Image (cartoon, helix red, strand yellow):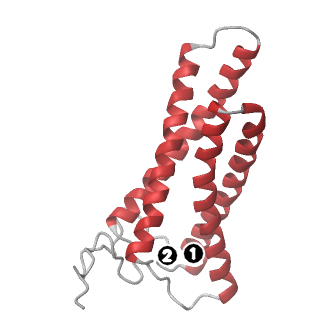
Amino acid sequence: MNVPTLPRWIRPVPGQYTSLQKALHWLVVAILTVQLTTSSAIERSHTAHHQGVEPDPLDLLLHEVHTFGGLAVFCIVALRILLRIIGGASSDSTDGARLLRIAATANHVLLYGVLLALPITGVAARYLDFLYYGPIHVALTRLLLVLVLLHMAAALWHLLIRRDDVVGRMLPFSSRSDRSTG
């Protein structure tokens, strides 16, 4: 049986990420920055509503931006997982300690899980039951912050202490491009 070769934008070369993987990673980072800056508008609009006051139109707009940003993150993360299933993963070098590889894998799995769960709980809080799902959404947001900080600390450790190419492989315009092996 002749199995077709996957295109390079789906199939990472060992030790590299595809341009699509990099773009989706940094798009999620950008959207999460917007999510962080729009989240306070949700609290303000809910507070105004509970006080019987009409919420500020800007807060309502930011609430919409936050909702649709969350849905975009869900779709992008789902696509990243699908690409990983279809094309495989960019394998890291095997010179790292086993415990560190396990920790890195756990952090990535938790990041993906929380990034999928946050939009679900956010939509549930908005459209089903804010009092029940809102606190879950907030708790997941705090967990995401911890996971992102760990992810960033690991990236800095690779960049400044180990001085390996782990960070460079995910940079949008890194010297290790995906033009090789096509």
Q: Amino acid at mark 1?
A: His
Figure label count: 2
108 or 117, which is in the foreground? 117
Q: Is residue 169 visible?
A: no
Dot 1, crowdedness within 10 Å: few (<14), some or many (≥20)?
some
Question: Tags 1 and 2 in contact by the CB under 8 Å rule?
Answer: yes
- Mark identifier at residue 166: 2
Q: Farthest top residue?
A: 53
Place of residue 64 in the rendered image (x, y in percent of width and height, measured from the top left):
52, 28
Picture quadrant where residue 59 is located = top right
Residue visible at 41% across and 64% down in the picture: 171
Alpha carbon separation for disc pair 1 and 2: 6 Å
Picture quadrant where residue 60 is located = top right
- Mark identifier at residue 158: 1
Tell me: 71 left or right of 140.
Answer: left
Q: Farthest front residue?
A: 1
Badge 1 element? helix
Residue visible at 62% across and 74% down in the picture: 104
- Depicted 93 relative to depicted 144: above or below: below
Q: Amino acid at mark 2?
A: Val
- Depicted 67 relative to depicted 87: above or below: above
48 or 82, which is in the foreground? 82
Residue visible at 44% across and 71% down in the picture: 84
